[in-house]
Image (cartoon, rainbow, N blue to C red):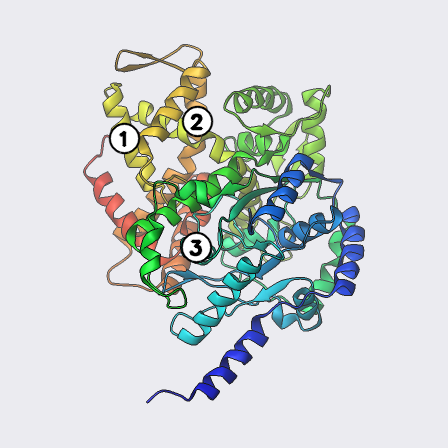
Amino acid sequence: MGESPDIIKEEAAEILEEMAQSLQLGIIRFFAFTLSKAFKKLFQRVKVNEEGIQRLQQAIQEHPVVLLPSHRSYIDFLMMSYILYTYDLSLPVIASGMGKIVPLNVITYFADFLGMKIVGEMLRMSGAFFMRRSFGGDKLYWAVFSEYVKTMLRIGYAPVEFFLEGTRSRTCKSLTPKLGLLNIVTEPFFKGEVFDVSLVPISISYERVLEESLYAHELLGVPKPKETTSGLLKARKMLGDDFGSIHVYFGHPVSLRSLAQKKINRSNFNLVPRHIPRKPTEDIQAFVNNTGYRMVRLQQENMVVSPWVLIATILMQDLPGVDSEYLIEKTAWLRSLALLFGAFLDWPDHVPTSKVVASSVALHHNIVRNVNGRVVLIDEEKPNDNSSDDLVFKKAVTVLMCASYRNQIMHVFIRPALVAAAIHTVCNARKEEVFSYFNFLRELFANEFIFTPGNAVQDFEDGCYLLVKCDAVQILKQDFVVTETGQSTISFLVAMLRPFLEGYQVVCKYLSEEVIEGFTEMQYVPAVRIFAVKMIISGYWLFLFNIYPAVHRSTNMAMPLWGLFSKVAHNPTSKL
């Protein structure tokens, strides 16, 4: 026998009180004043596309709005609210803190900041609402949570904001979209409760990420520090450092109604009362999934790439350092290639490349240094012993920080890089053979990079188009021909992809040589790290430092990797 309605109402009221935001203008003004002072200390400038602000202002007046920022730092949601306050727009209600996927296929949110007492309550009063890390089996919590979000959307008095990637990206690559909240905010439209919903992709780009060192340590297995008020106060020392510029690009609002036209039959929702929850049909799930990938791709297209990202990309192919003159020359070349491929570059006008490189190296003084005419990665300063493991750790921290900036431009190069790797690998340069290997790599990296499901042919054609555009290859009938000038471009693109391939190969090596029986995620990730460190100490190449981002994933990666190993074992002639 179930509980009485009174008890259920009381529990629901407690849940609502725990999660709900409570906007108060005084707290908002206090945050605006404080953030203004902090941002002026931390950043040289914050650049916002004002035409995007105007589009957003118009969208808010017409339909409910969902803001979908990229997520690279804790600063993201503070910056979003600060910008909207500055431009006198409605402040968003924000899903605070990220969690994990639970059995109901819902992305949940943990009150990372709620435990910070005073700060947590102040965030609540500035528009944050808090969710438990997991409520997959709690039907009442799920009902209250989803209805709370949908009610805010239906009323439409303020935009709803959440991070589609689900959590901060520790590697600074875009993460595959988590669809729980996207399912919730699309439901009122499907049920006819709102005429339309505007989805606004927002790209936040950092010249220097505040948590760069923290992310590297987390990837190396150091536990994430708990958010506390005292920890926040200790972080004040960062105010004396320079973190460069931030670019915030508000994309064009995307009409959910337009996306669903001729794809979703909403009349089916008329057969069931609106208040009765129902599981999404397969076509709805496919539509929401494609919409999620589309939004992340729109975020990527408007990410601003700094000169340091180009420098880091070059350094990652020539560890531990390169000659300064070579770096300047190679940076100028890579800048031209990136622009040709459609990158959104923040490059100062009328400034010599040598000065741009010198300025970027100075800004990232904690990663690189100019020593006797060579730009080299530095080891982390750490008062530990000089054991082999410790030396590897010190080097790995700066390598991973450098790699995180290289990752910020991977979305620009990944498609032509996959085609280049396929051309480099297959014995026969016929287009169908190249596509077959391209598709294999694309499937392999489906959780590593953003590829819209079912879009393999278009991705291949896009990659081919860019290689032809930069005169790296020619396509004669159905054959690829690498041009004389294009060989260096092909080699560079293959080298960009190689650390990811080799990282996966090391994981496969671990699975084939070390694993005897089943394992849990808690056993798997540390074990692969230890295995990689042993290989480095025994003389394996420096690229193994790239293993850490690859293995910092759920144990679900183990099975696809095992399948990959089986394929590689049957293809010993592979050059990669």
Residue 287 in picture, x, y percent from top left: 36, 47
Q: Nearer the viewer, mark 1 or mark 2?
A: 1
Q: Is residue 29 above or below residue 375?
A: below
Q: Earlier in the sequence, mark 2 or mark 3?
A: 3
Q: Nearer the viewer, residue 25 or 561?
A: 25
Is residue 21 rendered to the left or right of residue 452? Answer: right
Is residue 162 rendered to the left or right of residue 208? Answer: left
Disc 1 crowd, CA 10 A, few/some/many (<14, 14-19, 20+): some
Disc 1 + disc 2, Cβ < 8 Å: no
Q: Residue at x 32, y 51 (%)?
A: 510
Amino acid at pointer 3:
Gly
Q: Nearer the viewer, mark 3 or mark 1?
A: 3
Residue 246 in picture, x, y percent from top left: 68, 41
Residue 64 in picture, x, y percent from top left: 55, 52
Residue tagged 3: 192
Residue 444 in picture, x, y percent from top left: 32, 41
Q: Nearer the viewer, residue 264 or 311?
A: 264
> Which dot marks residue 437?
1
Q: Earlier in the sequence, mark 1 or mark 2?
A: 1
Q: Nearer the viewer, mark 2 or mark 3?
A: 3
Disc 3 + disc 1, Cβ < 8 Å: no
Amino acid at pointer 2:
Leu
Residue tagged 2: 493
| Distance CA(mark 1)–CA(mark 2) | 16 Å
Regarding residue 407, the answer to whether it shows in the image is: no
Disc 3 crowd, CA 10 A, few/some/many (<14, 14-19, 20+): some
Say what secondary structure mark 3 lies in. loop
| Distance CA(mark 3)–CA(mark 1) | 45 Å
Q: Earlier in the sequence, mark 3 or mark 1?
A: 3
